[in-house]
Image (spheres, rainbow, N blue to C red):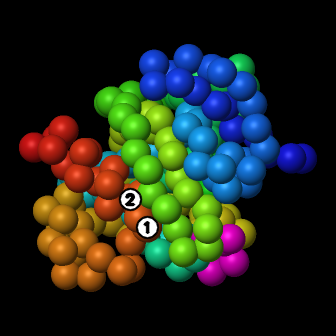
Amino acid sequence: MIEQVILVNENDEQVGLMEKIEAHEKALLHRAFSVFVVNDKNEIMLQQRALGKYHSPGLWTNTCCSHQREGETNIQAGKRRLMEEMGFVTELEELFHFIYIAPFDNGLTEHELDHVMIGNYNGAPNINPDEVASYKWMTAQDIKEDIERQPEIYTEWFKIIFEKYYSHIS
């Protein structure tokens, strides 16, 4: 199945559909989401991207993120991808959205209107090895300090999204 993204304007109104890679090659604004799963100890579940991913392999990022499909709500998309990547589903709540641009070394660019969601979960994930190499739980403060110490082990978009998330929860 060819994966398409929903092209949007700055008001998050759909203006078209495009094959995912083409949208990233052309750096066109499209709808996306990022999920942060937090446990009862207020730790965030991070995932390490699978080593076979076409960009940012092996880097740490938020619990999951992806693109909505046409006709899918943000919450439906977040739950679908959480199951596909991490092997569990939990209730999600949308916190905020914003636009960002993050270019990659391979010529692709993320230009996304990103819907950031949060959920609560205390179990261990059943990770999909095609998507995820590993996972760990960290407090927001520990993540903030670790990004300052070793930014190269985190995805470009996570550093941007986490800064917004951190200021939202602080």
Which residue occupies 10% across, 43% down? Answer: 170
Q: Is residue 23 magenta?
A: no
Residue 127 coordinates in the image, percent (x, y): 60, 64
- Cβ–Cβ under 8 Å for marks 2 and 1: yes
CA neighbours of label 2 inside 10 A, class few (<14), some (14 to 19), many (20+)? some
Q: Is residue 52 magenta?
A: yes
Residue 75 coordinates in the image, percent (x, y): 53, 28
Q: With respect to residue 123, does 99 lie above or below?
A: above
Q: With respect to residue 61, does 169 lie above or below?
A: above
Which residue occupies 58% across, 36% down? Answer: 30
Between 99 and 35, the residue placed more toward the observer is 99
Magenta residues, as a range? 51-55
Residue 155: numbered disc:
1
Q: Quadrant of residue 164?
A: top left
Q: With respect to residue 145, does 33 lie above or below?
A: above
Residue 7 coordinates in the image, percent (x, y): 64, 31
Q: Quadrant of residue 41?
A: bottom left
Which residue occupies 74% across, 50% down? Answer: 22
Residue 122: numbered disc:
none
- At mark 1, the secondary structure is loop
Specify the amino acid type for callout 2: Phe
Q: Main secondary structure of the magenta part?
A: loop
Residue 2 coordinates in the image, percent (x, y): 86, 47
Q: Residue furthest left?
A: 170
Specify the amino acid type for callout 1: Thr
Which residue occupies 66% across, 21% down? Answer: 15
Q: Which residue, given by chain and number where applicable, does mark 2 sit on?
A: 158
- At mark 2, the secondary structure is helix
